Image (cartoon, coloured by chain):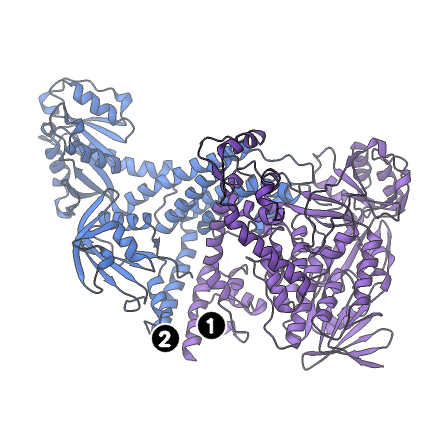
Amino acid sequence: MNSDRNIVAISTALGNGGISIIRMSGKSVLKIADSVFSAKIPVTQFEPRKLYLGTFEHGDIKDKCLCVYFKSPFSYTGEDMVEFQCHGGMTLTNRIFEELVAVGCEPATKGEFSKLAFLNGKISLDEAEGVIDIINAESESELKCGYNLMQGRLKEQIEKEQNVLTELLAKIEVSLDYPEEDLEEETREGVLSVLKDVKTDLKNILDTASFGRCIKDGVRVLIFGRTNAGKSSLLNSLLNYDRAIVTDIQGTTRDTLEEVFQYKGFKFILVDSAGIRQSSDVVESIGINKSLKELESADVVLYIIDGSVALDDEDKAMMKSLSDKKCIVCVNKADLGTCIEIDKEMFDDVISISTKTGQGVEELKEILYNFVSSKNVNNGSVVLTNVRHIDAIKRAMTELENAIDATNNYINLDLVSIDIKNVWLALGDITGNSDNEKIIDDIFSKFCVGK
Amino acid sequence: MNKNYDAIVIGSGHAGCESALALARMGKKTLMLSLNLDSIAFLACNPSIGGTAKGHLVCEIDALGGQMGITADMATIQRRMLNSSKGYAVQSLRVQADKNKYHTLMKKVLEEQENLHIKQGEASEIVVENNCVVGVRTKQGAEYSCKCAIVCSGVYLKSRIIVGEYSKDVGPNGFANATDLSESLLSLGFELRRFKTGTPARVQGRTIDWSKLEVQKGEDNIQTFSTMTAEKPQNVADCYLTYTNKNTHDLILDNLDKAPMYNGAIEGTGPRYCPSIESKVVKFSDKERHQLFLEPEGLDTDEIYIQGFSTSMPIDLQEKMINSLAGLENAHIMRDAYAIEYDCIDATTLYPTLESKQISGLYFAGQINGTSGYEEAGAQGLVAGINASLKLDKKEPLILKRSESYIGVLIDDIVTKRTEEPYRMMTSRAEYRLTLRQDNADIRLTEIGRKCGLVDNNRYNQFIQYLKEIDELDSVLDRVISPKELKEFFESKSEVLSMNSGLSLKDVLRRANITAEDIFEKFNDILGGYSIRAIKQWEINLKYSGYLKRQEIQINQAKKQEEQSLPSDIDYNDIKGLRLEARQKLNNIRPLTLAQASRISGVSPADISVLTIYLKTLARNK
């Protein structure tokens, strides 16, 4: 356990409550809070135990929330602590949490706040027993996770990457420990090509993190298109069928409205991009920029076109910008007859609908459902949901960048191997394998060395 | 006959010598028992000292005030810096040592050492009362009383050499082995294991056709093992290279049934890093040739050691195999190659001080602990000797950290993880190897040696002077050199000067292609008063600053666990929440710190969390 850590956790139950609490504990939490939160006075001048209203702003997140500072030792953990009370809803809460990790916090392990509280003499001996139970509960649940197919496969994939690195490390290290053997020395190009492959693989795995969120928090479906295309009607059509479970989780950072509906066990968050306006010079407008941001974070885009009128240049330009997204083109107003032709090659799906008659709406839901379930299969079921796993892979990626930079800059391989070892260790946090002996075993099994 | 000593060192190999010298130099009345005084500090295998990671160990022994570095420098007949084209952290000094000279020099040092008696005799029993060492008996009938004993029996315990069908219960090179001490250790409750190693044949130099071979020369301008060696040893001997070929391989493969390694005659576990030539040929069958080094055994002998050709094949086959090598077609074998099996203990039964957990005052060092190598043995001998002495003085023990020395890594590894084969030091075992370099061994360890009382005034004053030099260089190296002066200099070193504002000497040293030697020569008017060695420290720290800083952060992060000690009387079975495997492992290994506990295989991070809480509970209950 390392007291230099600044840890963060979402303290309130994840769900659609009105308010969420996110807590940080550690030496530098005040500084961290200062970098993301602004109130009428700087966070560093906050009076302890007093609530301040202000704005959390970092990355693409902006939320009005309350912030309170507890000064060590007068806090739950006994360390400096900062709490944010933000608007509820899983998406926003998770995003704020992620931003705090991005600025230097580490995700807390289960029971870590309580453990700190105990270690710093804030809770009693009796309570400590409970803390041990929590820690054990986690290690047991980790054990169970091992049998869980998804977790098991993630470990398997990371292990594969780790093995590739083990082999690379062994290759570099053997020439350091046995410089006199006539071994073929690993070349810079060889190192680079392995590192780049690992990077691609890790990036792919990391990309599933967003999909993991899809399952946990819902698939973000952005409804995109001109205002007269029938966008709002489509939103209503999709929601009408499941009105009972519609929940308003208004994203307070946006002018857009988020609505939730469930279909076959999956949750979809419909995001209405109100920012789109019918104008030829909208490209520069702020409204478009916001929508483009939404576009980035969206998992699926529903692009709605009025099928009763011909496409103009603006439509075409917009369509082009969507080409790298999962995009379903909904040609609306089918009841009025369709007069346009859509290049089906360009999009994942093109569907004819009528929000007036309800034609195609069920089919659209089925397409959305297929999207989630197929993505699941296509990725070999590896889905990153655990924040600590995501954190470990991100750390591995950073070290990987270091290693690649160093190799490109002609740094000696004995130094590069230190960077590579750090990647290896970060991955070891997921696979549970960080025993150096593995690399040494590899050296002796693959190379003929020794006097 | 009964004589009293503070300490008795059993064995006179590389561990025994360091151990006995440390004890005597720290003022303890010490007896060294040697099976044969002619085998003191005997280089039983390679006539060479150092090599990757091992060179680091020797420099560390030297910094702490041990003997190996000084004697090795004096016995050097050829020296080279391995990995010199790579980073400074992995550069290791390796020397060819004159085998007889090394023995003679070391014996003389022992003979001249105050407080130390050397005695030829076979230790047969360690006398223990109330779990404390009280004496040692010899097979010859002597009994010595003592407060502590250091077992440095090397490969001599019940050793047996094997050559083809021939096997004999003797020690290395036909020296007598020790027969009774194994029983004594068994009766004291130690588990004995059987390890195996081997050594190649020695051939006669004048029967080798050197003209067919590739020569390997020594290097002059490189550091020595000891900072106390004033005059660098000369390169007066050469090594040569030859290779195995298809004929050699066929000879081996056609006769595997005669190889004790393969026909079951050898039961001991051999080291993977010291494979016999038959293992190499069998295991790496796609390799067309294996490289062999021909190393001179000394200046006063014509014997040549064939590195890479250790075998336990029958002697007629050995001869055929050797004669199949280029340049050795007519070579005459003077000593046959052999495999050797011996008893050793499981070092996880020791504390990091190398004292037994069961018997107070009983220490173990060297190959008896399941390691291999002169340097590994010397390092352990030194640490065991220091700790035995500190214990006699009722002082705090010396436990070197992994972040502080290769010796720390070595000892932590062997007492924490049970090795199933002889343990060899490697740079890949040191997680902080960038910080643990040969060139800064003195900076890392001299103060520690001084505190133990092993660093004399002479060495210490020289060290303080060196630190002062480094300190002064801080401002000297801030001197800015004009672009005019730099231009030509940079061009000659294929560096580009992109600005025309001039650079400080520190900035110059940061350049990849520019070394301390370069600027010392070029700017001698400024730097002439300083040693290259001191400038080198600046060069390394400047060039690697990014990596060094990151390593320092990692070291600091680990510090808290390193400093959290675990009480010796914990019963891990009583700790609620620890998993069963962790309880068993912790009860067996009995780690001294939380960090050591975390390195035991089978102890998970969750177990460490539980332990942390338990410790806090203990502290609060007090």
Evaluate whether residue A170 shows in this view: no
Point out the residue furthest to the front here.
Answer: B525
Tell which chain the image draws in blue. A
**Badge 2 amino acid:** Leu
Mark 1 on the same chain as mark 2: no
The quarter of the image holding the C terminus of chain A is: top right
Marks 1 and 2, how far apart in space? 14 Å
Residue A125 - label = 2
Q: From the viewer's perspective, is residue B156 above or below residue A310?
A: below
Q: Position of residue B535 (x, y in %)?
A: 58, 47
Residue B416 falls in which quadrant of the image?
A: bottom right
Q: From the viewer's perspective, is residue A248 above or below residue B617?
A: above
Q: Residues within 10 Å of mark 1 (few under 14, many from 20)?
A: few
Q: How many marks?
A: 2
Q: Colour of chain B?
A: purple
Q: From the viewer's perspective, is residue B616 above or below residue B284?
A: below
Tell me what residue is drawn at x 68 percent, y 58 percent: B62
Task: Specify the subunit that label 1 lies on.
Answer: B
Instruction: Give the number of the mark in front: 1 or 2.
Output: 2
Q: Which residue is mark 1?
A: B575
Task: Specify the subunit that label 2 lies on.
Answer: A
Badge 1 marks a residue whose secondary structure is loop
Along the line of sight, the residue nearer the viewer: B66 or B223: B223
**Badge 1 amino acid:** Ile
**Horizontal relation, residue B539 to residue B183: left or right:** left
